[in-house]
Amino acid sequence: MGLISSLKKAFSKPYKTVSVVEAKDLLSSGAALIDVRSVQEWRSGRAPQAKHLPLDRLQAGTAGINKNRAVIAMCASGVRSASAARLLASQGYEAYSLRGGIGAWRQAGEPVR
């Protein structure tokens, strides 16, 4: 492997960042949606199909997430979900981070309860 390909691999993301539209497509294909925000944030509104799994709990273990399904991580803005997706990808999951988080979800007119 050459130096350039080694560097590309070292600095590439092991997960993909997706838009709300792309996330909805993945969800309709059976992907799981996990919300990695705090309990207070979760209580302020969440996507109906999301499972709550705060980032600190996710870092302690994957808490029963099925490895046979793609996993989309969601947070407030996309920063914590990127950390969650990176962690999940490192453990062999097909992982995605929702760009813009719950704010983008709301802005796209998706339901929040």
Image (cartoon, helix red, strand yellow):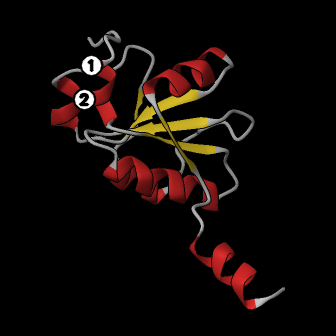
- Name which residue lies at 28% across and 13% down: 112
Q: Residue furthest bottom?
A: 3
Residue 103 got which mark? Answer: 2
Q: Type of residue at label 1?
A: Arg
Q: Residues within 10 Å of mark 1 (few under 14, many from 20)?
A: some
Q: Percent position (x, y) of residue 2?
A: 80, 88
Of residues 49 and 14, the one drawn nearer to the viewer in this rendering: 14
Q: Percent position (x, y) of residue 24?
A: 53, 19
Residue 95: quadrant of the picture: top right
Residue 109: quadrant of the picture: top left
Q: CA distance from mark 1 to mark 2?
A: 5 Å
Residue 97 got which mark? Answer: none
Q: In the rendered view, does 89 fall on the left or right side of 72?
A: right
Of residues 87 and 22, the one drawn nearer to the viewer in this rendering: 22
Kindly check if marks 1 and 2 are in contact, taking CB atoms under 8 A apart as contact: yes
Residue 8: quadrant of the picture: bottom right
- Name which residue lies at 35% across and 12% down: 110
Q: For the C terminus, which image quadrant?
A: top left
Residue 106 got which mark? Answer: 1
Q: In the rendered view, does 80 fall on the left or right side of 16?
A: left
- Name which residue lies at 60% across and 19% down: 25
Of residues 27 and 55, the one drawn nearer to the viewer in this rendering: 27
User: Dot 2: what SS?
Assistant: helix
Q: Percent position (x, y) of residue 27?
A: 58, 20
Q: Percent position (x, y) of residue 19?
A: 46, 31
Q: Residue furthest right?
A: 1
Q: Residues within 10 Å of mark 2 (few under 14, many from 20)?
A: some
User: Dot 1: what SS?
Assistant: helix
